[in-house]
Image: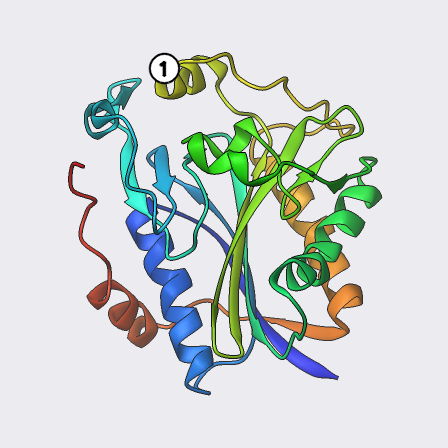
Amino acid sequence: MKVWRLIPLLEAPGQVQMAIDEWLLNQHQQGLHPPALRFYTWSPPAISLGYHQRQYPASWHHLTWQGTSVELVRRPTGGRAVLHQGDLTYAVVTSGFSGRRLQVYEKICEFLIQGWRSLGLELHYGSAGRGYIHNPNCFSTATGADLVLADGTKLIGSAQLQRGNTILQHGSMRLEPETKLFTQVFGEAAPSPVDIPVTQRGEALIQTVVDAMTEAATHCFGVQLVTQPFSETEWQAILTAKPAPTSEP
């Protein structure tokens, strides 16, 4: 059975989280690191921009929430802006998946579908066309790479980067977002809250979701997950490669 590395749940600033994902991608592409799965949260709150996203409000560089600056970072993957507050992000770094990009999305997203099914939610893929590129907000539309509830409410927005045979796919799961901050950022009403059928909230909810997704990943990918935190040497390499803050458009 193939072994993947499971990196423990990590809370950190967006610049650090994106540096980790890109470092894992580069290391795996060079054959220096096994496939990896990780889950993380963003502190302070942040807006992540798609790699090619150039149009967004200049005011995003000066946002604050509860006395803290909202960080603006750029993902190595594509897609639209995502507000990271009250969400949980997953990241998969692997290789060996064949097929068109959307087929690869579906192969990777299967563990999310099965994991959320075990928690009582049935998800399916969105159906938005290319018109989504004109909206800066990722969660205002759901493409075939995103997972939605039966009523169309989007729970998970994902983005992907392929370098040769190596894939980074990460995505945001809306758990307990602050609707006022969403409106402040995007100037529109927040999507309907998702009624998650578990009793836990806060950190306990996050851990419940992580456990369910981790269990589903072992079955969907047919792998053994071995938990291994980053070593001091790895942290030094990751932080050395951390990208500079996003400049104003």
Residue drawn at the location 31% of the way across and 54% of the way down: 16
Q: Is residue 31 above or below residue 13?
A: below
Tell me where residue 207 appears, x and y as whole percent.
Answer: 62, 44
Q: Is residue 216 above or below residue 201?
A: below
Tell me where residue 88 appears, x and y as whole percent.
Answer: 54, 41
Residue drawn at the location 46% of the way across and 79% of the way down: 28
Look at the image and name its color scheme: rainbow
Q: Secondary structure at mark 1?
A: helix
Horizontally, residue 111 falls left or right of residue 58, namely right
Dot 1: few (<14), some (14–19), or many (≥20) neighbours within 10 Å? Answer: some
Q: Quadrant of residue 200?
A: top right
Horizontally, residue 182 falls left or right of residue 98, namely left
Q: Give 195 or 152, whichever is nearer the viewer.
A: 152
Asked whether residue 19 appears in the rendered view, the answer is: yes
- Furthest-bottom residue in view? 31
Q: Quadrant of residue 188?
A: top left
Residue drawn at the location 43% of the way across and 70% of the way down: 24
Amino acid tagged 1: Gln
Asked whether residue 84 appears in the rendered view, the answer is: no
Q: Is residue 155 above or below residue 146?
A: above
Tell me where residue 4 appears, x and y as whole percent.
Answer: 61, 75
Residue drawn at the location 18% of the way across and 37% of the way down: 249
Tell me where residue 240 appears, x and y as whole percent.
Answer: 20, 67
Q: Quadrant of residue 149?
A: top right
Horizontally, residue 9 falls left or right of residue 204, namely left
Q: Give 158 or 133, whichever is nearer the viewer.
A: 133
To which residue does mark 1 refer? Answer: 184
Quarter holding the N terminus?
Answer: bottom right
